[in-house]
């Protein structure tokens, strides 16, 4: 059980940061899905654990209210998914996390059932599929397809590029991985997405080094 949860919690840390966010504090009169998603974004930015927890818990409550008022709203389900996922990361490796994961995935799948072209949900789904082992529902081929779809439709998407770069690197396609990571880093720097920059730099360094080693072995 513990090893499974270690994988899941690690996956959530990368899958939950989806597309570039311009979210600011929403006024009280804003639509409920926006309020819930804003709590998710604000919680990610907070440094203090109690503040983060408070945002995600309130985001979950507002998200549940949004779903109750309009079950057919993809944004409501995605906002709830976002907060549930972040709460799992705070909870850590506990038995209840596995149950929480099932609920989180249910909200993500419902989002895509309602809105198959929901880019943030597609990016999250694709990232999870390429990283989860097969016994947990992973599907690298389908995950890659979804990530490529996101990149095609949202050229500024950083996380989808990084997730795809990791797949390419693991497959030995280091030049392609480096190109994806380089573009992701440039976008993150241009848009001041500070949370993405270290990961993009690390991915680029790894892919570049691996590509150089391969060339040395061939020469």
Image (cartoon, grey):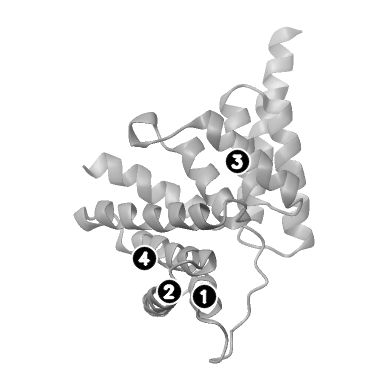
Q: Secondary structure at mark 2?
A: helix
Please state which of the two labelled residues, at mark 4 or mark 3, is closer to the viewer: 3
Q: Does the CB distance between marks 2 and 4 fall below 8 Å?
A: no
Residue 45, picture quadrant: bottom right
Element assignment for label 4: helix
**Nearest to the observer: residue 143 or residue 52:** 143
Q: Give whichever of discs 2 and 4 has the lower sequence position.
A: 2
Task: Give residue 87's mark.
Answer: 4
- Residue designated by label 3: 146
Q: Which sits earlier in the primary sequence, circle 2 or circle 3?
A: 2
Residue occupied by mark 2: 63
* Farthest-out residue, bottom: 28
Which residue appears at 49% of the width and 68% of the height?
79
The residue under the point 62% across, 50% down is 159
Dot 4 and dot 1 residues touching (CB under 8 Å) = no
Mark earlier in primary sequence (4, 3): 4
For disc 4, the neighbor class at 10 Å (few under 14, some 14 to 19, many from 20) is: many
Where residue 115 sits in the image (x, y, percent)?
Answer: 56, 56
User: From this viewpoint, is residue 134 visible?
Assistant: yes
Q: CA distance from mark 2 to mark 4?
A: 13 Å
Residue assigned mark 1: 33
């Amino acid at each position: 059980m513990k090893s499974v949860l270690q994988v899941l919690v690690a996956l959530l840390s990368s899958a939950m940061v989806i597309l570039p966010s311009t979210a600011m504090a929403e006024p009280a009169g804003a639509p409920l899905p926006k309020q819930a998603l804003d709590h998710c974004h604000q919680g990610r930015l907070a440094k203090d654990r109690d503040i983060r927890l408070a945002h995600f818990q309130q985001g979950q409550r507002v998200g549940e209210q949004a779903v109750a008022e309009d079950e057919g709203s993809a944004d409501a389900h995605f906002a709830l998914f976002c907060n549930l996922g972040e709460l799992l990361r705070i909870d850590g490796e506990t038995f209840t996390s596995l149950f929480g994961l099932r609920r989180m995935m249910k909200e993500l799948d419902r989002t895509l059932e309602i809105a198959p072209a929901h880019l943030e949900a597609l990016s999250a789904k694709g990232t999870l599929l390429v990283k989860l082992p097969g016994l947990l529902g992973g599907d690298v081929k389908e995950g890659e397809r979804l990530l490529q779809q996101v990149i095609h439709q949202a050229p500024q998407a950083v996380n989808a590029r990084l997730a795809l770069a990791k797949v390419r690197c693991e497959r030995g396609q280091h030049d392609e991985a480096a190109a994806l990571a380089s573009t992701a880093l440039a976008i993150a720097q241009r848009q001041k997405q500070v949370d993405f920059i270290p990961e993009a730099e690390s991915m680029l360094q790894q892919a570049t080094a691996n590509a150089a080693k391969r060339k040395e072995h061939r020469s």
